[in-house]
């Protein structure tokens, strides 16, 4: 795959760096709540796997790709806010459907490699 440096940085910020930060934030949130680890199940284990990555691996990545990471964090936070407003609305089902299609596509692309 041939990408410009800017496109590469933007895409890896979304597909690699953002997942690391999401995992780290979830694990830190769980750590902040007494007894949460006692009831955590497979979803928490799956989503916090990346939080096991040492910071030393990420320090330079965050320093050199901070602008694209900040941009995708902003978009992701906006998506979370949208989901928050949809919690009691039927429109949230559409987001689940879109997300499921994207997850299927990710898996299909991953299998093709």
Image (cartoon, rainbow, N blue to C red):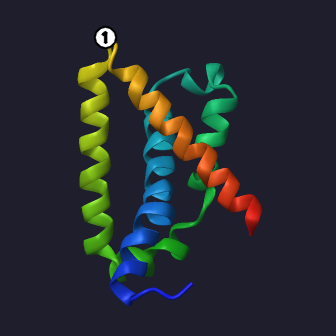
Vertical arrangement, residue 3 with respect to residue 47, above or below: below
Quarter of the image for residue 61 reads bottom left
- Quadrant location of the C terminus? bottom right
Vertical arrangement, residue 9 with respect to residue 113, above or below: below
Residue at the spot of label 1: 88
Q: Position of residue 32 (x, y in %)?
A: 43, 33
- Mark 1, other Cα within 10 Å: few <14 / some 14–19 / many ≥20: few
The residue shown at (61%, 53%) is: 106
**Residue 72 vs residue 54, the one in the foreground:** 72
The residue shown at (47%, 28%) is: 96
Q: Position of residue 5 (x, y in %)?
A: 38, 88
Vertical arrangement, residue 77 with respect to residue 3, above or below: above
> In the visual, does 72 lie left or right of 97?
left
> Is residue 40 visible from the viewing direction of this image?
yes
Quarter of the image for residue 101 reads top right
Quarter of the image for residue 29 reads top left
């Amino acid at each position: 795959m041939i990408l410009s440096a800017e496109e590469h940085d933007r895409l890896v910020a979304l597909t690699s760096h953002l997942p690391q930060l999401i995992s780290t934030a979830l694990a830190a949130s769980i750590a902040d709540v007494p007894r949460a680890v006692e009831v955590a199940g497979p979803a928490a284990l799956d989503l916090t796997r990346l939080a096991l990555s040492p910071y030393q691996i990420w320090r330079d990545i965050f320093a050199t790709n901070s602008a694209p990471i900040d941009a995708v964090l902003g978009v992701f936070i906006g998506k979370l806010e949208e989901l928050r407003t949809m919690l009691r609305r039927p429109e949230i089902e559409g987001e689940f459907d879109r997300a499921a299609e994207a997850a299927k596509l990710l898996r299909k692309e991953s299998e093709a490699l």
